[in-house]
């Protein structure tokens, strides 16, 4: 039996597999030696699960329901063809991932896949008061600043401008993780960084979330209530088929939107935009 240990957002993950697993390079900074008892455990088993009633179907990924349990069905390329895998939650924090027996004969798994894509990571994070936000993140003066917006708006550009003009470190380029622990929020790098290629296993206290909008003029304003909640909720991963997930995620993001300073920045991709944000953060506006 092979055992692997991953640490994401200070959440320890244990993967148990009967054959070796090939990890993509972006996961390697998050691999760790065995530590304390894991927060999340995934056991890879040989076999398949009887199909249930289809709830959601999106290409190579689907959700099925059987006996009041959700089954996550995802296709993987193994043994020279596409194969179905089945993920079930046995109890909070413990999952079983079933893989066809023929796939085990190759002696390794996931050489063409990201194993994390098969683990319902967003669900495990939520159980630990954390969520993924579609954002680029910089660490400036020891604090995390997140730039969030739909793809193509300029998140990576703003992060690069902060690096260039204010000496900020870029922690993650596409999907960061925000986690609430002991009443405070920290932002963590993740193995998902888009085209930036920046996958740092580092964290910082959250100073602010900046909601970006392209504009010919640079303007900033503080957001409250719905104006803060909706953009954050829109840029996280939503499992709308699960009532329990939606309720917990709504509460978590609602609290984050109320407790973290959230700003709307209509801006050009220039230094002036970064100076405008910096001045507001320094005076606590």
Image: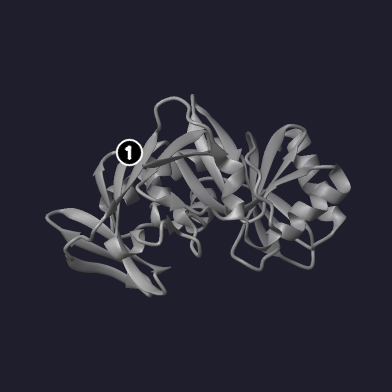
The residue under the point 35% across, 63% down is 103
Say how many tags the image has: 1
The residue where tag 1 is placed is 93
Relative height, residue 209 to residue 212 (above, below): above
Q: Is residue 198 visible?
A: yes
Measured from the top left, where is residue 61 in percent x and y?
Answer: 36, 68
Measured from the top left, where is residue 100 in percent x and y?
Answer: 28, 63
Measured from the top left, where is residue 251 in percent x and y?
Answer: 39, 42
Q: Quadrant of the C terminus?
A: top right
Secondary structure, mark 1, is loop
Nearer the observer, 245 or 259: 245
Instruction: Locate residue 32 relative to residue 81 in the image: left or right.
Output: right
Relative height, residue 245 to residue 111 (above, below): above
Relative height, residue 37 to residue 122 (above, below): above
Quarter of image, res 125? top left
Measured from the top left, where is residue 132 in percent x and y?
Answer: 50, 49
Nearer the observer, 99 or 145: 99
Colour mode of the rendering:
one colour
User: What crowding class fits label 1: few (fewer than 14 Cα within 10 Å), some (14-19), or many (20 or more)?
Assistant: some
Instruction: Locate residue 239 relative to residue 192 in the image: left or right.
Output: left
Instruction: Locate residue 209 relative to residue 61 in the image: left or right.
Output: right
Q: Is residue 189 visible?
A: no
Q: Quadrant of the N terminus?
A: top left
Question: What residue occupies the far left of the structure in this picture?
Answer: 67
Quarter of image, res 267? bottom right
Nearer the observer, 148 or 215: 148
The residue under the point 41% across, 38% down is 14
The residue under the point 63% across, 61% down is 194
């Amino acid at each position: 039996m092979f055992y692997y240990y991953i640490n994401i957002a200070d959440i320890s993950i244990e993967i148990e597999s009967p054959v070796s697993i090939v990890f993509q390079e972006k996961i390697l900074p998050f691999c760790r030696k065995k530590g304390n008892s894991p927060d999340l455990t995934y056991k890879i088993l040989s076999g398949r699960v009887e199909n249930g009633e289809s709830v959601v179907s999106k290409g190579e990924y689907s959700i099925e329901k059987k006996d009041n349990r959700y089954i996550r069905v995802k296709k993987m390329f193994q043994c020279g063809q596409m194969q179905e895998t089945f993920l079930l939650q046995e109890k909070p924090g413990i999952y079983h991932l079933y893989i066809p027996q023929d796939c085990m004969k190759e002696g390794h798994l996931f050489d063409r896949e990201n194993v994390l894509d098969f683990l319902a990571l967003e669900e495990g994070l939520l159980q630990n008061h954390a969520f993924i936000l579609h954002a680029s993140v910089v660490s400036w003066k020891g604090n995390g600043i997140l730039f969030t917006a739909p793809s193509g708006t300029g998140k990576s550009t703003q992060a690069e401008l902060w690096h260039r003009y204010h000496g900020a470190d870029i922690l993650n380029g596409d999907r960061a993780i925000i986690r609430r622990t002991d009443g405070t929020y920290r932002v963590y790098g993740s193995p998902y960084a888009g085209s930036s290629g920046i996958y740092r296993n580092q964290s910082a206290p959250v100073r602010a979330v900046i909601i970006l909008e392209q504009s010919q003029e640079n303007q900033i304003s503080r957001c409250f209530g719905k104006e803060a909640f909706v953009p954050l909720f829109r840029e996280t991963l939503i499992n709308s088929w699960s009532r329990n997930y939606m309720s917990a995620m709504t509460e978590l993001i609602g609290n984050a939107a109320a407790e973290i300073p959230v700003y709307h920045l209509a801006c050009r991709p220039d230094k002036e935009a970064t100076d405008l944000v910096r001045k507001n953060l320094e005076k606590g506006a």
